Image: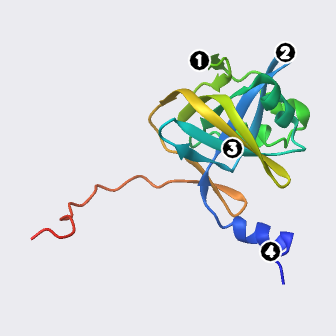
C-alpha cells in the first residue's frame, strides 16, 4: 500500500534543517519564500537547488528573472521566516522594509543573514507539485553566528558549541 500524503508529511516533520529564504525581484520590490528544500548540488561548477511549489507566488518570478538568492537565516530571524512563508498574506512575501543589497546577478540578498548564495538560473526540472530550480552560484558570502533550525513544526537554536576533544585519527598507532 502506498504512503499517504499525511504519513509522508508526518515523517518529514522529523527532519531538522536550517531555514532559508529564497529571494527574487518583483514589480516594485523583492519577493521572498521560505524554502525547506535547499541543498548544494555540485562544487564544479558551483550549483545549488531549491524546490518551489508550482502554486507559490514566487514560482513564476524566478523563471522570469532567471536569478535568485538563497539567504540562510540566523537564530533570531523567525519573523523573517514567517513573513516569507506567507503567514502574513501576499504582502508578507514582499519583505518590505528588510534591508538588502545586490551582488553579481541583481537578485536581492538580505542583510544580516548567516550565509547567502547569489544564483543565476541554470535549469529547472519537474518535481511533481514542485519545480526543482538549479542555480549556478555566481557569488556567496557568510557571517558569524548560529543558524535558525526548524523541526517538528517549530524553530530551534543550536546550543553553544563545546570545545572539541582531540581524537586520534583512525588507524593511528
Q: CA distance from mark 3 to mark 2?
A: 24 Å
Q: CA distance from mark 4 to mark 1?
A: 42 Å
Q: CA distance from mark 1 to mark 3?
A: 19 Å
Q: Secondary structure at mark 1?
A: loop
Q: Position of residue 32 (x, y in %)?
A: 76, 33
Query: Is residue 113 in view?
Result: no
Q: Which residue is mark 4?
A: 7
Q: Which residue is mark 1?
A: 104
Q: Position of residue 87 (x, y in %)?
A: 84, 43
Q: Position of residue 35 (x, y in %)?
A: 71, 45
Is label 1 in contact with label 3 (beta carbons under 8 Å)?
Answer: no
* For residue 19, above or below residue 153: above
- Judged from this view, the residue extending furthest toward the left is 173
Q: Secondary structure at mark 2?
A: loop
Is label 3 in contact with label 2 (beta carbons under 8 Å)?
Answer: no
N-terminal of the two: label 1 or label 3? 3
Image quadrant holding the C terminus, namely bottom left
124 or 158: nearer the eye? 124
Name which residue lies at 59% across and 47% down: 39
160 or 69: nearer the eye? 69
N-terminal of the two: label 2 or label 1? 2
Image quadrant holding the N terminus, namely bottom right
Q: CA distance from mark 2 to mark 1?
A: 20 Å
Q: Position of residue 79 (x, y in %)?
A: 72, 39
Q: CA distance from mark 3 to mark 4?
A: 23 Å
**Could you tell whether 89 is left or right of 78 in the image?**
right
Q: Residues within 10 Å of mark 2 (few under 14, many from 20)?
A: few
Q: Residues within 10 Å of mark 1 (few under 14, many from 20)?
A: few
Q: Which mark is residue 28?
A: 2
N-terminal of the two: label 3 or label 2? 2
* For residue 88, above or below residue 31: below
Q: Which residue is mark 3?
A: 50
Amino acid at each position: 500500500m502506498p504512503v499517504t500524503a499525511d504519513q509522508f508529511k508526518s515523517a518529514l516533520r522529523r527532519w531538522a534543517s536550517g531555514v532559508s529564504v529564497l529571494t527574487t525581484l518583483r514589480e516594485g520590490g523583492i519577493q521572498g519564500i521560505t524554502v525547506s528544500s535547499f541543498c548544494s548540488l555540485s562544487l564544479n561548477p558551483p550549483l545549488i537547488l531549491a524546490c518551489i511549489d508550482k502554486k507559490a507566488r514566487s514560482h513564476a518570478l524566478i523563471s522570469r528573472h532567471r536569478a535568485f538568492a538563497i539567504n540562510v537565516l540566523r537564530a533570531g530571524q523567525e519573523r523573517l521566516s514567517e513573513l516569507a512563508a506567507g503567514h502574513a498574506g501576499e504582502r508578507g512575501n514582499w519583505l518590505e522594509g528588510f534591508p538588502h543589497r545586490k551582488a553579481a546577478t541583481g537578485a536581492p540578498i538580505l542583510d544580516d543573514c548567516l550565509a547567502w548564495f547569489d544564483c543565476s538560473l541554470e535549469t529547472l526540472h519537474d518535481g511533481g507539485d514542485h519545480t526543482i530550480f538549479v542555480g549556478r552560484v555566481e557569488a556567496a558570502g557568510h557571517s558569524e553566528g548560529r543558524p535558525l533550525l526548524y523541526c517538528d513544526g517549530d524553530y530551534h537554536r543550536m546550543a553553544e558549541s563545546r570545545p572539541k576533544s582531540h581524537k586520534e585519527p583512525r588507524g593511528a598507532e
